[in-house]
Image (cartoon, rainbow, N blue to C red):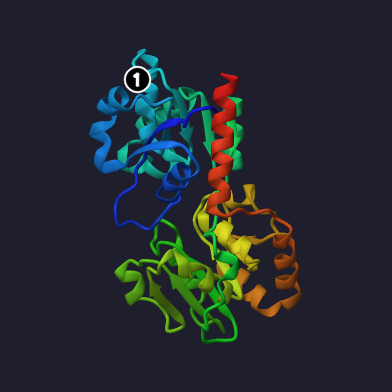
């Protein structure tokens, strides 16, 4: 495009939170030539004035807030090219808090009202296409220096690891219970609910929140990496794959992304799965080799993919 694309980004990001997809992408997009105005959660009230003042060629909305620009579009109050980044299954994850019917309606409006739907989930990308929308799979990424990080030194001969928020909503309590009495050390990287810490067995080690730049070093130190959340598009999945860590995962949506028995051991019984991987070096090696053949990207590369998808869609619109 001959002049910098003016893009207004609307997200749920909060200051001080663990960096996520839309903490990372706005500065990368700006550094590659787009003129960016990012309105995180605390600045949502500025959205309508920004449409007038900033005059964006494109609006990108990530998360359930995406229903609002779609609602404006339906009423003829938004003329910018509209992109929805479908980052999660909103109704499934938020329906219990706000009412499934309400959240499902917001989710559908956000998707069907967009000119382009992007998503880090292959299944949600396909669902958007089935709904008649132009869609692009834009994966999560890893830090630019991920490959250069040396592994941390962690105690134990069988080091089982998890990265992410340590709570019941993500089913991490099942992981903590699973390692009780097993011949392994469990390392949990991320903020934890206090009662899970208090009731944990002695071989569970809570490392707390660590800087994003250090995550790679911890992941590379794991002999076995664990996925517990019922999700097919976690950042930690990309980090585990990039580091080629043998993965054991709780059954659920993860089977949409990883092939059971080939790329991960997917099970309803974490204890049995972890025990099997501890005992079976050949299986660990096979899983690691399979992951080495999967393509992953750094966040700067993800930003390039996002820009290409949006600019191509605008040209075709």
Residue 71 found in image quarter = top left
Q: Quadrant of the N terminus?
A: top right
In the picture shown, does residue 70 fall above or below 146? above
Task: Name the residue at 35% across, 67% down.
Answer: 192
Task: Name the residue at 55% across, 72% down.
Answer: 149
Element at label 1: helix
Q: Position of residue 164 (x, y in %)?
A: 44, 62
In the picture shown, does residue 277 fall above or below 39? below
Examine the rendering and report whether any part of residue 132 can be seen.
Answer: no
Left or right, 156 with reference to 214: right
In the picture shown, does residue 122 fall above or below 128? below
Residue 270 found in image quarter = bottom right
Q: Position of residue 229 (x, y in %)?
A: 49, 56
Residue sitting nearer the eye, 224 or 102: 224
Q: Position of residue 226 (x, y in %)?
A: 55, 66
Q: Residue furthest front?
A: 2
Q: Residue furthest top?
A: 76
Task: Name the residue at 48% across, 65% down.
Answer: 163
Left or right, 49 with reference to 237: left
Q: Which residue is mark 1?
A: 72
């Amino acid at each position: 495009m001959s002049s910098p694309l003016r893009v207004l980004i609307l997200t749920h990001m909060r200051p001080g939170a663990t960096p996520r997809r839309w903490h990372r992408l706005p500065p990368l997009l700006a550094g590659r030539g787009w003129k960016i105005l990012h309105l995180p959660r605390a600045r949502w009230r500025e959205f309508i004035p920004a449409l007038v003042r900033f005059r964006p060629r494109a609006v990108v909305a990530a998360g359930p807030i995406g229903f609002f620009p779609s609602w404006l579009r339906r009423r003829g109050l938004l003329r910018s090219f509209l992109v929805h980044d479908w980052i999660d299954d909103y109704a499934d994850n938020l329906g219990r808090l706000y009412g499934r019917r309400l959240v499902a309606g917001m989710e559908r409006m956000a998707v069907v009202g967009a000119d382009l739907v992007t998503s880090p989930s292959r299944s949600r990308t396909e669902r958007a296409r089935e709904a008649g929308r132009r869609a692009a799979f834009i994966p999560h990424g890893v830090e630019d220096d991920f490959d250069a990080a040396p592994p941390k030194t962690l105690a134990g001969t069988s080091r089982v690891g998890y990265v992410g928020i340590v709570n019941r909503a993500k089913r991490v309590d099942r992981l903590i219970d699973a390692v009780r009495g097993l011949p392994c050390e469990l390392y949990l990287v991320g903020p934890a609910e206090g009662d899970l810490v208090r009731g944990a067995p002695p071989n569970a080690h809570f490392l707390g929140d660590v800087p994003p730049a250090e995550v790679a070093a911890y992941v590379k130190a794991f002999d076995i990496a664990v996925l517990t959340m019922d999700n097919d598009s976690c950042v930690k999945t990309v980090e585990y794959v990039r580091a080629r860590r043998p993965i054991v995962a709780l059954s659920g949506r993860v089977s949409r992304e990883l092939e059971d028995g080939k790329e991960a051991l997917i099970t309803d019984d974490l204890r049995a799965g972890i025990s099997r991987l501890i005992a079976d070096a050949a299986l660990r090696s096979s899983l690691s080799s399979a992951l080495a053949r999967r393509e992953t990207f750094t966040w700067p590369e993800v930003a390039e993919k996002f820009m290409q998808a949006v600019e191509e869609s605008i040209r075709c619109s």
